[in-house]
Image (cartoon, rainbow, N blue to C red):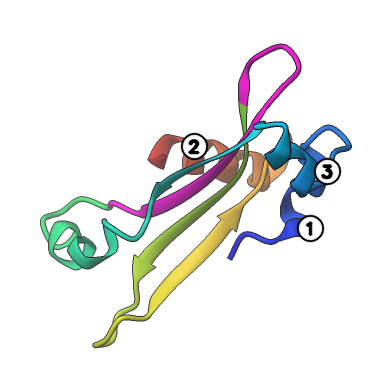
Amino acid sequence: KITTDDIMTQIGGLTIQQAMEQKRMYILDHHDYLMPYLRRINTEGVCVYASRTLLFLRDDGALRPVAIELSLPDGGVGGSEISRVFLPASQGTDAHLWHLAKTHV
């Protein structure tokens, strides 16, 4: 669900291809292996999400998260899921949601 438009403003003026070629884009992927277990885990009174996080290596050597996708299985039977992408924000509700998404990751 994370799109090119979601991350273009977050990667220092590079294209995604350039960031990948320079080994500055990373993915932390806890999605596919967790999805089959989430229904069972989340019935135990906790809330766990499957996640994908894109990280960008800044010029100062720090990794900066640029997009987070959190997913849950939908309420029906089958393999479909509900996913939402969160982007960096510094104000309002979006900033709070960004901090909560980072906490889940």
Three-letter code for the amino acid on which mark 2 is drawn: Lys
Q: Residue furthest top?
A: 60
Dots 3, 1 in contact, CB < 8 A: no
Q: Quadrant of residue 85?
A: bottom right
Residue that mark 3 sits on = 9
Is 5 magenta? The answer is: no
Residue that mark 2 sits on = 102
Q: Residue furthest right?
A: 13
For marks 3 and 2, give the one nearer the viewer: 3
Q: CA distance from mark 3 to mark 1?
A: 8 Å
Q: Position of residue 74 (x, y in %)?
A: 34, 77
Three-letter code for the amino acid on which mark 1 is drawn: Asp
Quadrant where the image shows the C terminus: top left
| 2 up-or-down from 79: above or below | above
Residue 37 appears left or right of 13: left
Residue at the spot 68% in from the left edge and 41% down from the top edge:
20
Residue at the spot 15% in from the left edge and 57% down from the top edge:
41
Is 52 magenta? The answer is: yes
Q: Position of residue 4 (x, y in %)?
A: 74, 58
Residue at the spot 58% in from the left edge and 41% down from the top edge:
98
Q: Position of residue 50 (x, y in %)?
A: 35, 55
